[in-house]
Amino acid sequence: MITEEIWIKYKETEDKKLKDLLIINYVPLVKIVAGRMYNFYGSKVEFDDLLGYGILGLIDSIEKFDISKNIKFETYAQIRIKGAIIDNIRKLDWIPRSLRKKSKLVQQTMQELENKLGYTPSNIEIANHLNIGVEEVENILSDIATFNVVSLEEFLKNKSEGILDSKDNSELPDDVYEKKEIKAILIDTINNLPEKEKLIISLYYYDELTYKEIGNILDLSESRISQIHSKTMLKLKNDLIKKGINDH
């Protein structure tokens, strides 16, 4: 029985054996997504744990996927698999309260200075504003790098909730508009980044390279790449908030 036939019969009968066949068929997709995310969170979480969280997302995808809609299951599932992994990482609460506080402080400082100066503040300007050394600012940015990836992705996921579910035929125009607006703001923000920051974002998210690999390409230390990436994540989040997409 080919995959398409399994889908049709499963949606007609909701037979558990057919559902299990679909899960087995798409496990390689979960491994791909989990492998990519292991590059982000590998120092904090075991790969097998990420795989387990991803399987939960896959099961949720299979249950909620609407085969009558013109969308590839793989595209739909990757969103939910990634979302399930992020949700479970957050539940682990491995991020110290002090680190969350530092991240919020740097984010608010960047927002305040950007409003005042009209451009993204340098590390020196952030340090002067906080009355701390530049090295301390750089250490904070390095420390909060992974946290900022989780934070921003969770923020975006929450803001898109309700329109990721393809079985929901009552999509509100406001929700659809907001999702498009978020995407447009992100694209605009990324396009307006300095070339180095833009390249790092591209290499990290699209080419899925590690900090070390990016550092080798740009002849920068792994720590420096981490700092630049972290600061860019804070800028993206501030731009969303500035445009009225509030972080609740």
Image: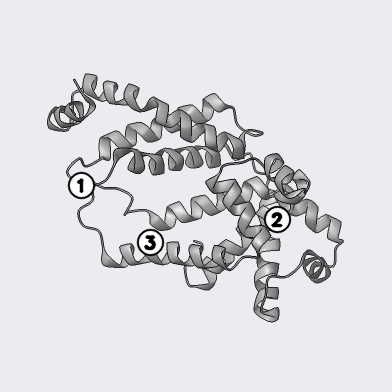
How many C-alpha atoms fall within 10 Å of the one at disc 3: few (<14), some, or many (≥20)?
Answer: some
Q: Nearer the viewer, residue 147 or 248?
A: 147
SS for dot 1: loop
Q: Quadrant of residue 172?
A: bottom left
Which amino acid type corresponds to the residue marked 1 in the rendered image? Lys
From what the image shows, is residue 20 above or below residue 131? above
Task: Give whichever of 43, 226 is nearer the camera.
Answer: 226
Residue at 68% from the left image edge and 70% from the top image edge: 120
- Quadrant of res 72: top left
Task: Tell me, yes or no, if residue 246 can be seen here.
Answer: no
**Alpha carbon of mark 2 to alpha carbon of mark 3: how far?**
26 Å
Tag 3 residue: 179
- Amino acid beneath label 2: Ile
Residue topped by disc 1: 69
Q: Secondary structure at mark 3?
A: helix
Residue topped by disc 2? 228
The image shows residue 119, relative to residue 146, as above or below, that is: below
